[in-house]
Amino acid sequence: MAKSVPYKIYLTENELPRRWYNIRADMKEQPDPIINPGTGKPLTQEELSGLFCTELAAQEMNHTDAFIDIPKEVQAFYKMFRPSPVVRAYCLEKALGTPAHIYYKFEGSNTSGSHKLNSAAAQVYYAKKQGITHLATETGAGQWGTALSMACGFFDVDLKVYMVKVSAEQKPYRKAVMETFGANVIPSPSDTTEVGRKILQANPGTGGSLGCAISEAIETAMTTENCRYVLGSVLDHVVLHQSVIGLEAKAALEKYDIYPDIIIGCAGGGSNLGGLIVPFVRDKLTGKANPHIIAVEPASCPTMTRGRYAYDFGDLGGTTPLLKMYTLGAGFIPAANHAGGLRYHGMSPIVSKLYHDGLLDEARAVEQTKVFDAATLFAKHEGTLIAPESAHAVRVAIDEAIKCRETGEAKTILFGLSGTGYFDMAAYMDYRSGEMVDFVPSDEDLERGFASLPTV
Ligand SMILES: *Cc1c(COP(=O)(O)O)cnc(C)c1O
């Protein structure tokens, strides 16, 4: 008899991961190197250390150590909000009438409301340790800025957050939360930076974009004394920190001899998906198991399903190093009516490489009204109001569970539930009033973005 599985599986404090997992050490082929656009050559760790603090630059370049110790201070911070539970979605299974077993790893049970705190804690700790006194960053939907504000409040580091203007207007409470933790929040594009002033001049009515806010944050980091830039997604060191999600999920499931057949995550910059899947991709690399892994993205910002695998800038201003990734072009600006987050034009180089090499099996694009259908169903049956981003993963988990109902297969599905949606009620309201429309960019729309790709 199999052990009966509780609604929630928690690890004990003693069982929490003490090391992050660095999948690059196990990848047979490395992602292509980061390129310095000035020299056209691979970026050195030293060059990267001007932008990011030293330890993070080292982690970004590390492709030899499979496991990296989580500093004691970060472990202590983690214990304030971890372990996060693995939840068996019994009620949703029943509502769907599916034989599938559905599990989700819930990262929304901290005040910032998402997984982003996992990396924020680590990044601010390393900055503080190095004696950095100021950090600058961007935030789109607001979760990264909030997580970073919490970590900066905790470790006592000064923080400037460039928040995408439409988002700052839609979510005044997010801004207030960040300010409560001590951050200085500036709607972007702003007139506080040269690049912001340029973008405003060219595009006076713009509601901003992540790519534009990144340019502003980088300029601030480069022109402020003892300041560094921090990024909440995309980069290898962020995926490294987020591996805590997958490590915990795998260990929790192992307690009940459970191994997923299907693993699903939503993908914006790729960090929660990457963090969830890397320990399972390791099993693929070693031939131990072969779960089917699905990345889910919005049809309005279809980076993996319709993008190019190419070198691109991380920002609109073209100030970052060049990353080889799936991208819609840094010049791609998603539809203003798209509510669901996941608006970034690029994708984590690690996630991109795994997808390119077939280790991440599938990418699916879903339309936002269907995403909110799933979020609403999930709220009713699982009692959690989730972030629109996370609802992309829920959409596909439900679709897979319905397939199981049709075939009678009792597959085990694990998905990442990256966060809560309390600050996304405007989008939920648009959905319920019928004002939400699905926007799928035409090929010509995408061509405009591709035209901004640099020649490398
Ligand atoms: C930021 C965010 C995402 C998207 O970022 P990734 O780096 O792709 O994980 C997804 N869900 C939530 C709740 C977020 O805050």
Image (cartoon, rainbow, N blue to C red):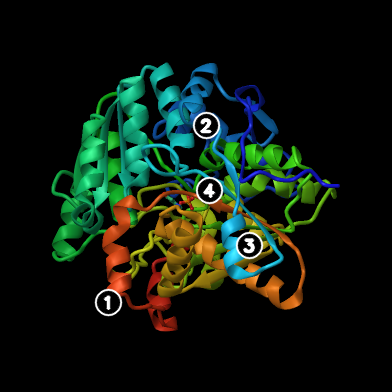
Return the residue at label 1: 435
Q: Which mark is residue 82?
A: 2
* SS for callout 1: loop
In front of the other: label 4 or label 1?
A: 1
Displayed quadrant of residue 160: top left
Of the residues shown, which amino acid type is indicated by label 2? Arg
Q: Looking at the image, is mark 3 or mark 1 earlier in the sequence?
A: 3
Return the residue at label 3: 294
User: For the residue with label 2, is its CB less than 8 Å from the closest atom of ligand 1?
Assistant: no
Which residue occupies the foreground of this view, 409 or 112? Answer: 409
Return the residue at label 4: 272
Residue 81 appears left or right of 91: left
Of the residues shown, which amino acid type is indicated by label 1? Glu
Residue 62 appears left or right of 210: right
Of the residues shown, which amino acid type is indicated by label 4? Asn
Residue 328 shows in the view: no
Up/down of 208 relative to 288, above or below: below
Q: CA distance from mark 3 to mark 4?
A: 13 Å
